[in-house]
Amino acid sequence: MNIRESAQDYLETIHILLQKNGKVKSIDIANEMGITKQSVHRAVKNLKEEEYIFVDAKGYISFCEKGEKIALEVYEKHQILAQFFMSLGVSSDIAFNDACKIEHYISSESFLAIKNMVNKK
């Protein structure tokens, strides 16, 4: 996956908001991530240009195929890593925060081993 960490975070956030609300606009992303509308506008523009997302005439955001694939991969890593840390006794807040940092850098081999361990429990 050759995409910047920040772009991965945007795609994951879009996925979460679509799951939660069924639709998403730039303002929803800004509110969810606690960042400015201008930052989101730039990111959405870049993601659209790189064909990760599509923005319709009303401003609603949906995924292109490759954007959805990346969003699902990042989301899965986040969830699995957080579950793994919580199984070690780490509090939920810290587990999800740490998982967010690690999801971008963990090797496929290490992630698969952790995923297999979490899924056995």
Image (cartoon, rainbow, N blue to C red):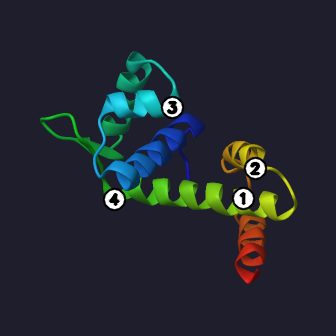
Q: Which mark is residue 48?
A: none
Q: Which residue is mark 3?
A: 33
In the image, taking residue 59 as reference, residue 2 lies left or right, namely right
Other residues around mark 3 within 10 Å, as few (<14) / some (14–19) / many (≥20): few
Residue identifier under label 4: 65
Residue 16 falls left or right of residue 100: left
Residue located at (41% from left, 33% from top): 29
- Are dots 1 and 2 in contact, CB under 8 Å? yes
Q: Residue 95, percent across and down?
A: 76, 50
- Residue 58 appears left or right of 11: left
Q: Give percent across and percent down for residue 47.
A: 37, 37
Residue type pointed to by label 3: Met
Looking at the rendered structure, the kind of residue marked 1 is Leu
Amino acid on which disc 4 is placed: Glu
Q: Residue flagged by tag 2: what amino acid is it?
A: Ala
Q: Which mark is residue 81?
A: 1
User: Above or below — where is 8 with respect to 113?
Assistant: above
- Residue 16 spot, x, y in % from top left: 45, 50
